Amino acid sequence: MDEGMMFNYYLPVNIVFGRGRSGEAGKLTALYGKRVLIVTGGSSAKSSGLYDRVRESLNNEGIKTFLFDRVKQNPLTSTAEEGAAFAKENGCDAVAAIGGGSVMDCAKAIAFLAVNDGDISDYIFNVKRSDKALPIIAIPTTCGTGSEGNGFAVLTNPDNGDKKSLRCNAIVPKVSIVDPLCMMTMPKKVLASVGFDALCHCIEAYTSKIAQPFTDALSLYAIGLIADNFAKVYNDGSFADGWDRITLASTIGGMVINTAGVTLAHGMEHPASGLRNIVHGQGLAALTPVAVEASYKGDEYKFANISRLLGGSGAEDCALRIRMLLRDIGLEYTLSELGIKEEDIPWMAENCMKVSAAGIANNPVVFTQQEIAQLYEKAM
C-alpha cells in the first residue's frame, strides 16, 4: 500500500537577519554567557572594525571577552583543540564566532571540545557521540558556507589529511546574526569563491537522494536568488539589495545541507583541499561542472530546473550554465591549476570513499572509487 509522503525536518536555529543587526550582538549574547570566547581569523574582522564593534557591544552588556584569533582556511582539528583549551583556562561559558565558514566551523568545534573529552576525530567518525557544547553565537562575514544555519563543522586532521565534518545538533548556533553589511568588505576573489560554495550547497541539497519538500523549496528559492544577483554583486559591490539576497541564499544553503546533505562535488573537493589546502570554492569550481555532467541523468527533472534558473533550457546544459557563471565571476579553475598532481588522484579517490561516503551515496548517480578517480582526471 502507498504510504504517501513521509519526512522529518528539524533545525533549531534562531536567525536574526538584516543590515546593521550585528549591533545587537551584546543583547543577544547576554542570554547565553558572561565570559565569552570570541573566535576569529588573523585580520579581516579586525581590519574591518567588526571585531571591535562586537566586543564593545558585548562589554556594554557586562560580558567579559577573550580572543582566539588563530583560525586559518580549512581549519585544523589541532587548532580547535588549542581553542578549547584556551576557553577552559578562562572559564568561558559561550563562544562567539566572527568570520567566514572556517572561523564558524572552528568555533563550533571549540565549543564542542570545551565540554567533551577525547579525540575529536572519534566524534567526527561516530566512534563516540555527544549532544553537549557551549552555546554558540555566529556572526558570518562571508556569504558562503552557511555554517550559521546548521550543525556541521568541517575540520582537517593535520596528521592524515582527512577533511570531514563534526555533525550534531549541539553545535547549531543558539543565535546567528546575519548582517549583509558585514559581507561588503570582502574582496571580489573571496566573494566569487564563497558565493559559488553557497550555490553548490543549494544544488547538491536539491538533487540529493535524501532531499525532501522543505529542502527542495528552500534550495530552489536560494538558487534563484544567487542566479539573479551573484554576477551583479560581483560587478557592483554597492548593490545593497543584491548583497541581502545572496547573503540570505548562503544562509539557506547552510540550512538545507543540514537536512539533505551534500553530494558528489563536495565529496570530491574535501580530499583535494584536505591534501593541498586548496580554497574550498576554487576546488568546487574545478569539480562541480564535471560532477554535474556525470550526474544529471540521475535526476533530469531537477537538473533541468536548476539549468532554467541559471538561464539554460534543460538538464543537458546545466553544467554549461555553471561554467558560464564561473567565467562571469572569474572562478574558472582546473585541479592542476590548484596544485593537484596526477599522482594525488588514487589517494583522493580512496579518501573520498572514506570521508564522503554519505555524500557519494546521496548523489543522483552513485559512482565507484575507480569512476571517481576518472572524474578527478577529467577535472585536471
Image: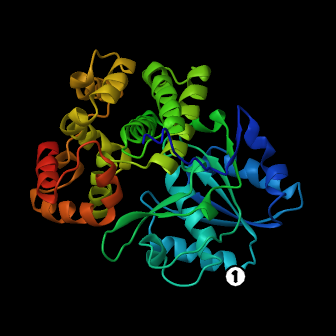
- Image height of 157 relative to 203, above or below: below
| Quarter occupied by residue 115 | bottom right
Q: Position of residue 54 (x, y in %)?
A: 74, 50
As drawn, is 51 to the left or to the right of 232? Answer: right
- Image height of 204 relative to 126, above or below: above
As drawn, is 341 to the left or to the right of 8? Answer: left
Q: Residue at x 45, y 46 (%)?
A: 260
Q: Quadrant of the N terminus?
A: top left
Extreme-front residue of the structure: 1
Q: Position of residue 26 (x, y in %)?
A: 82, 52
- Image height of 327 relative to 10, above or below: above
In front: 327, or 308? 308
As drawn, is 194 to the left or to the right of 176? Answer: left
Q: Residue at x 41, y 72 (%)?
A: 125
Residue picked out by circle 1: 89
Q: Is residue 104 visible?
A: yes
Q: Is residue 186 visible?
A: no
In front: 25, or 32? 32
Q: Position of residue 283 (x, y in %)?
A: 30, 47
Q: Say what amino acid the circle numbered 1 marks.
A: Glu
Q: Residue at x 53, y 33 (%)?
A: 218
Total tally of numbered discs in the picture: 1
Q: Position of residue 52 (x, y in %)?
A: 73, 51
The colour scheme of the drawn protein is: rainbow
As drawn, is 361 to the left or to the right of 30? Answer: left
Mark 1: give few (<14), some (14-19) or many (20+) Cα within 10 Å: few
In front: 273, or 360? 360
| Quarter occupied by residue 42 | bottom right
Secondary structure beneath label 1: helix
